[in-house]
Image (cartoon, rainbow, N blue to C red):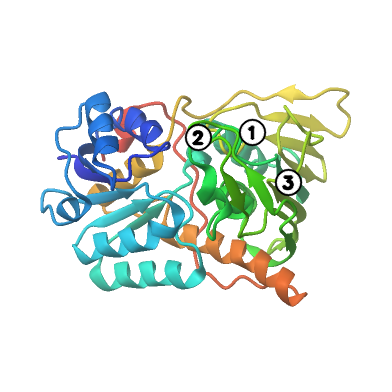
Amino acid sequence: MEPLRVGVVGCGAISGAYLKMARNFPAMRIVSVADIDPAAAQAKAREFNIPRVCPVDELLGDKSVDLVLNLTIPKAHCLIALAALAAGKHTYSEKPLGVNRDEGRKILDTAAAKGLRVGCAPDTFLGAGIQTARKLIDDGAIGRPVSFTAFMMNHGHESWHPSPEFYYERGGGPMFDMGPYYLTALLFLLGKVRRLSGIATIAVADRTITSRPKAGKKISVQTPDHIAGTMELENGVVGSIIQSFATWHPPFEGDQPITIFGTEGTLKVPDPNQFDGPVCLRLAGDKEWRNMPLQFATGYGRSIGLAEMAAAIRGSRPHRCSGELAFAVLDMMQGFFDSSENSTDYWPKASFSVPPPMPASSDSSLFQE
């Protein structure tokens, strides 16, 4: 079966991770790249042997492109997604789907009207680490899940990212930047959320970039940089989440940031920003943690979700990194802000299906259906 032809819009820092992994999957082929900075697109094309570099409008209008991979900054995600859909192309975006619910809903409604697919990162939950954790939970390894903690805590990106300003604009911040990894993993592992509450604040309002090439530039933070919340799931599980760019030396530093507590034991889940990583189990009577063997294919990286979507399109089946799942995450992220602003619980409304587990196979033909 012919691979899906993919055009990439956005050649910034994250694009290298996608382009490096994309060539491993026969279900798709990167055929062109575009960026508002032509030099950035030319550099990525040379590095990854991509045959065509063109302006964004030209790529969107190219009839040989089946799907647009949208790697722009968050505030441009909706604009590019809608332009791709208007051109009759499927779209797969970096997270978040949009910077608010209205953008996310417009993307999904437009795609539905045109009979096109929407996919969205993160795809890290497709990796062996979180897939193995899901299997252990489904198999009853910790009994009935009761609670969880999900903490992502650091002091922000201005010390290492070459252009960190957008992390502190609307659509950035720890919840919209890292929250998609944590919330997507929790939905996949434990199911849908019934209600949530949150407190969101700007704790460090003024920042100075120390990374090159913009060292010394000042940033005025425009979005909450510390969010603490609670969640109640439909199955009765309750848990706590913190997403912060305003903290030093978190208590779990170097450890696994998601822990799931059950009636028979506790499970430490790998970093949801990674694909593999350790899965640790400790039952009620155990004196020590046990590293559990990974039961799924290892070595995936960014583009696995895109490849799985391409295979699903060719195979006429649902894809796992769906727009509906991404919209549910977007709804929840904005819900934490709404809860903080209104001093009340938020009840998520998005309709989506929890993705099924991945096949326990290392065969790359999985993505050539």
Callouts 3 and 1 close, C-beta under 8 Å:
no
- Local secondary structure at mark 2: loop
Quadrant placement of the C terminus: top left
Rendering quarter of residue 346:
bottom right
- Local secondary structure at mark 3: loop
Callouts 3 and 2 close, C-beta under 8 Å:
no
Q: What residue would you read off at disc 3? A: 246
* Amino acid on which the number 3 mark rests in the picture: Ala
Q: What residue would you read off at disc 1? A: 270
Residue 184 can be seen, yes or no: no
Callouts 2 and 1 close, C-beta under 8 Å:
yes
Q: Which mark is residue 127?
A: 2
Instruction: Tell me if 23 is positioned left or right of 152 in this view.
Output: left
Whether 305 is drawn above or below 76: the answer is above
Rendering quarter of residue 253:
top right
- Of labels 2 and 1, earlier in sequence is 2
Q: CA distance from mark 3 to mark 2?
A: 29 Å
* Amino acid on which the number 1 mark rests in the picture: Pro
At 18% from the left and 62% from the top, the residue drawn is 87
Quadrant placement of the N terminus: top left
At 56% from the left and 66% from the top, the residue drawn is 331
Determine the residue located farthest toward the front in the rendered image. Answer: 216
